[in-house]
Image (cartoon, helix red, strand yellow):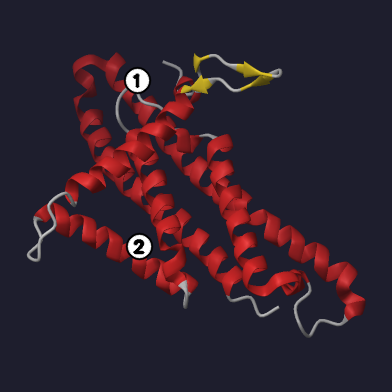
Amino acid sequence: MNPLHQFQVKTLIPFELGGLNLAFTNSALFIVLSAVLGTLILWFLLRKEAIIPSTGQSLAESLYGFIKSTAHDSIGEGYEAYLPFILSVFILIFMGNLLGLTPYSFTFTSQLAPVGAFALLGLFVSMGVGLYHHKLAWFRTFLPVGIPIILAPLVVPIELISFLAKPFSLTVRLVMNMVVGHILLKILANFIYTSGIGGAFPLVFVMLLMVFELGIAFLQAYIYTILTSIYLGEALHSHA
């Protein structure tokens, strides 16, 4: 009945290596399920491609076009090289949010560790993109052109903190939205369960809230994706 129990990470397959806990948990399981199901769904929708698309093909192509447009607007010229990464991020986060709404499941996007790891991956990718295209000149990002060198001790730490805060903002925004929504659903579900027939009206409210949560699942995946795209665009087109 405790609404926080749904966020408990449980060990499914214990494993240690050199004193390091590498156990396979329910969180890891749903990360794998999100990736596999996302891939299978896209394969199923596109298994019979045709000039006149079926409903499934149209749905998959619409999703691809939507993410492509987002990547183009956020990254700009050269976005095509990063489109597979951006699409993968969206599908993984969206499927994680979606699976978390099913009964007896686990929402890995409500955990700081996996979401933070994905955010750090995005940060490292953007750093790699910046260094690849701008070489060592990319480090001028922390001291923009036109700033007097005498202000470097003040400007560089501020820019560095702002840069490192990007994965933190990505992580906290997604995790808190998932946690709050699921706690509210759990509290209302407990209330309906204990109210018996008197819970009929709250049940209608919960059904409406579930529809709202589906929208939030998509919206949070989209926000996560568009911010990742923006960070890539900043690295790619840095004017340092």
* Front residue of this view, candidates 194 and 92: 92
Disc ID at residue 190: 1
Q: Is residue 51 left or right of residue 45?
A: left
Residue 179 visible, this angle: no
Q: Earlier in the sequence, mark 1 or mark 2?
A: 2
Front-lying residue, 138 or 186 = 138
Pointer 2 residue:
67
Q: Residue at x 45, y 39 (%)?
A: 178
Q: Position of residue 97 (x, y in %)?
A: 38, 40
The percent coordinates of residue 17 (x first, y second) are 65, 19
Question: In this view of the protein, which residue sits in the foreground, 185 or 164?
Answer: 164
Residue 190 occupies quadrant: top left
- Where disc 2 sits, the SS reads helix
- 161 relative to 76, above or below: above
Locate residue 135 relative to residue 63 in the image: left or right: right
Does residue 177 lie above or below 76 as drawn? above
Using a 10 Å C-alpha cutoff, classify the residue at mark 2 as few (fewer than 14 neighbours), some (14 to 19) or many (20 or more).
Answer: many
- Discs 1, 2 touching: Cβ within 8 Å: no
Residue 184 placement (x, y as % from top left): 40, 33
Q: Decide if residue 101 is in sight here.
A: yes
Please give the name of the residue rendered at 54% of the width and 45% of the height, measured from the top-left corner: 118
Please state which amino acid type lies under the numbered disc 2. Ile
- The secondary structure type at the circle numbered 1 is helix
In space, the residues marked 1 and 2 are separated at their CA atoms by 38 Å
Residue 121, given in percent of the width and then of the height, sits at 58, 49
